[in-house]
């Protein structure tokens, strides 16, 4: 997998010109990469370490004895120099000329690391191995600095099917590993330490799923916006390219519709024409409850397209309204009236006129000033693809009055 990463920033808030519709839950794949990092630490030398190395540099062929060096340095006991040479030997800064001989300046010489130490002025310790756990967005490759909370081992609403996920990584570049470890403030990275090698433990890594909410809205140009709450710019760009015919969105678009009677809805409306008639969008999950509340609020009359009578909870609320003395008039096509004849309450008046456009409007009108409608509307995806989408909306008061007048005129009651 190519290492094309970026530090994503949180997505900005939605455009205020977008009409809020609802939100959906998405499960986003995150790869947990388990690595073993080899870390080398370095430090500044102690004074006696530096002096001992300088003695071997200045007198490579005829160095002083331990006693002579101790006397010159003002050290009473040469044992301190012996301990220093032991430390330098274990750090591979010096080595014995004769492995069987003792540790003194005459039997020691600088190693390649010792000569490098003179140039760099720092001592390197023995390499240490540390576990390094990384969380990486499996789609965008972005690093997740802190382990995400509330993750799931199995997704409920996967953005990508588990069997279609990108190939998991088997390597992490050294520079990338250093960058991510610093970003995570790994405790093993102390002053002067550095990762020198990193190995991915392929058998130990897993994919987890991070839940997100995505808000859905429609802007003034009829473009559907799906904004990832708390996501990054790169995640949002990827989501914008996702086909809105994805199962998650299809489920959302159809959840406001009585599927067996979706054919009751009229032909697709151009966005501009539809937009002029609405006051706001209704969440698919709230359509039935909003319709019930609207019927319950009626004081005089209810005009209901036959579509609404196919919804049992709404139909029950209309029966209760009639029992309160609320006048109920249903309207629709003749074929629709035959299809739902058994669902129409006994005292309901039915207006049928195949030539009248109003009979094709799946609206619910209450007291001439409030209304709901469920329409098929031509919208556009962020990728400029045309889509016919079913949308529930509240009507403007003027539109509700206009349609009521058309229905009354059709019935000859104006």
Image (tube, rainbow, N blue to C red):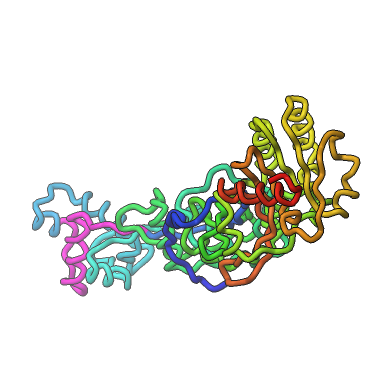
Q: Is residue 210 visible?
A: no
Horizontal side of residue 341 vs 319, given as left or right: right
Using residue 379 as the reference point, say whether residue 43 is left or right of it: left
Quadrant in which the N terminus appears:
bottom right
Q: Residue at x 62, y 46 (%)?
A: 283
Horizontal side, residue 163 vs residue 212: left or right: right
Residue 63 falls within the magenta-colored stretch: yes
- Taking the magenta stretch, the answer to whether it contains residue 34 is no
Q: Whole-percent x and y of residue 383?
A: 58, 71
Residue 193: percent from the left, percent from the top?
Answer: 35, 58
Horizontal relation, residue 48 to residue 170: left or right: left
Q: Residue at x 15, y 56 (%)?
A: 67
Q: In the rendered image, is residue 251 in sight?
A: yes
Residue nearest the observer in this picture, 384 or 47: 384
- Rendered view: 174 above or below 128: below
Above or below 171: residue 151: above
The foreground one among 177 and 295 is 295
- Per the rendered image, the range of residues in magenta is 41-67
Quarter holding residue 226? bottom right
């Amino acid at each position: 997998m190519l290492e094309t990463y970026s530090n994503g920033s949180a997505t900005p808030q939605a455009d205020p010109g977008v009409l809020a519709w609802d939100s959906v839950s998405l499960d986003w794949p995150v790869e947990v990469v388990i690595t073993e990092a080899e870390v080398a630490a370095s430090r500044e030398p102690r004074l006696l370490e530096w002096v001992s190395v300088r003695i071997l540099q200045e007198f490579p062929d005829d160095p002083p004895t331990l006693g002579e060096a101790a006397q010159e340095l003002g050290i009473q006991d040469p044992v301190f120099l012996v301990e220093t040479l032991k430390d330098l030997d274990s750090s591979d800064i010096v080595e014995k000329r004769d492995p069987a001989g003792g540790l003194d300046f005459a039997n020691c010489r600088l190693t390649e690391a010792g000569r490098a130490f003179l140039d760099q002025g720092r001592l390197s310790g023995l390499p240490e191995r540390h576990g390094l756990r990384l969380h990486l967005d499996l789609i965008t490759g972005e690093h997740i600095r802190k382990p995400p909370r509330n993750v799931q081992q199995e997704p409920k609403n996967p953005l990508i099917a588990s069997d279609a996920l990108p190939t998991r990584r088997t390597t992490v570049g050294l520079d990338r590993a250093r960058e991510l470890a610093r970003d995570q403030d790994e405790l093993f990275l102390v002053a002067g330490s550095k990762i020198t090698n990193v190995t991915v433990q392929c058998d130990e890594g897993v994919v987890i799923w991070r839940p997100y909410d995505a808000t859905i809205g429609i802007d003034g140009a009829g473009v559907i916006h799906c904004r990832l709450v708390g996501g990054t710019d790169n995640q949002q760009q990827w989501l914008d390219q996702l086909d809105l015919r994805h199962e998650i969105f299809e489920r959302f678009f159809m959840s406001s519709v009585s599927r067996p009677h979706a054919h009751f809805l009229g032909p697709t409306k151009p966005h501009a024409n539809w937009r002029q008639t609405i006051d706001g969008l209704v969440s698919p999950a709230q359509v039935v409850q909003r319709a019930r509340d609207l019927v319950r609020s009626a004081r005089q009359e209810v005009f209901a397209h036959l579509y609404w009578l196919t919804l049992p909870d709404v139909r029950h609320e209309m029966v209760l309204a009639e029992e309160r003395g609320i006048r109920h008039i249903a309207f629709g096509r003749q074929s629709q009236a035959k299809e739902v004849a058994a669902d129409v309450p006994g005292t309901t008046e039915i207006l049928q006129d195949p030539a009248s456009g109003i009979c094709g409007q799946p609206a619910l009108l209450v007291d001439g000033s409030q209304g709901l409608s469920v329409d098929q509307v031509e919208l556009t995806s962020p990728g400029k693809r045309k889509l016919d989408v079913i949308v529930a909306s509240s009507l403007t008061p003027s539109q509700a009055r206009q349609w009521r007048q058309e229905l009354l005129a059709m019935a000859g009651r104006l």
